[in-house]
Image: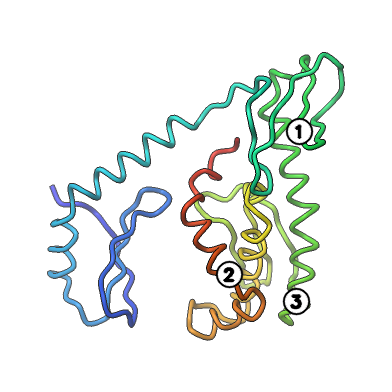
Amino acid sequence: MNLEYSVIYSKRKSLSIIIDRDSSVIVRAPIKISQEKIDREVQKHKKLIQEKISRKLSISIQNQTKEFVSGESLLYLGRHYQLEIVEEPFNGIKFDNKFFISKENKQNANQLFRDWFIKSAKELFIPKVDFYAKQIGVTVNKVNILSLRYRWGSCTPKDNIHLNWRLIKAPMTVINYIIVHELIHLIEPNHSTEFWNRVSIQLPAYEKAKLWLKENGRGLEKDF
């Protein structure tokens, strides 16, 4: 049985096979390469591709649940902070170089943390969008903090910016990169040389953030 995949053509000189965050297979190929050659390359590496997909799915399943007990850690702005369950009754989440939740609310911990992270994302992301929009010279209609599936951000024809709330777990450099990336898409819709030049003007070290996201992005996808 042949392996299913999608192809993205560009002016690149060589062919590469990528397993995307949703475990779909993407082939990045030169414009003039034949479909037959692409298919031969994919099927030649079929076993290795399937093994990588299986490993990704296995890791995803293992990381799906968190028990919310004292000593567990949660990722926030690129750092792991310990959780402490306390006897003191209070609503919501407290944070002071450590996360605190009342024992009486432990059964609702997943929703409470989700609400806290989304609120924190709004408080941090929206001013950052305003700052970089002025730097770049674009006007943003609205910033939406959403639960995006397999995407960190997007922009719309109506100049709205959508950002994935789970980005709040990434380092600030990565958050800035995604925000700048989407804002520049309001000017340059494609990932052209001009697009990346504009990104580098705002963030000279953007490639480090891009690499961090490539290496650690799957760890951000689950809620906690």
Question: For this view, does 191 lie left or right of residue 131?
Answer: left
SS class, disc 2: helix
Quarter of the C terminus within the rendering: top right
Query: Which quadrant of the figure has residue 155?
Result: bottom right
Residue 137 is situated, as x and y percent measured from the top left of the image, at 74, 82
SS class, disc 3: loop
Residue 94 is situated, as x and y percent measured from the top left of the image, at 82, 32
Q: Which residue is mark 3?
A: 139
83 over 179 or under it: above or below:
above
SS class, disc 1: loop
- Around disc 1, counting alpha carbons within 10 Å, would you say few (fewer than 14), some (14 to 19), or many (20 or more)? few
Mark nearest the camera among 1 and 3 is 1
Q: Are marks 2 and 3 in contact (CB under 8 Å)?
A: no
How far apart are the alpha carbons under marks 2 and 3? 22 Å
How far apart are the alpha carbons under marks 1 and 2? 29 Å
Q: Which residue is mark 1?
A: 98
Question: Which residue shows up at 50% across the image and 51% down it?
Answer: 150
Q: Which residue is mark 2?
A: 206
- Around disc 3, counting alpha carbons within 10 Å, would you say few (fewer than 14), some (14 to 19), or many (20 or more)? few
Residue 174 is situated, as x and y percent measured from the top left of the image, at 62, 59
Work out whether mark 2 precedes mark 3 in sequence or the reverse, and give the earlier one.
Answer: 3
Q: Amino acid at mark 3?
A: Thr
Work out whether mark 1 precedes mark 3 in sequence or the reverse, and give the earlier one.
Answer: 1
Q: Amino acid at mark 1?
A: Lys
Residue 200 is situated, as x and y percent measured from the top left of the image, at 60, 78
Question: Which residue shows up at 17% across the image and 71% down it?
Answer: 35
- Around disc 2, counting alpha carbons within 10 Å, would you say few (fewer than 14), some (14 to 19), or many (20 or more)? many
Q: Amino acid at mark 2?
A: Tyr
Foreground pick, 125 / 160:
125
Question: For this view, does 157 lie left or right of residue 36?
Answer: right
Work out whether mark 1 precedes mark 2 in sequence or the reverse, and give the earlier one.
Answer: 1
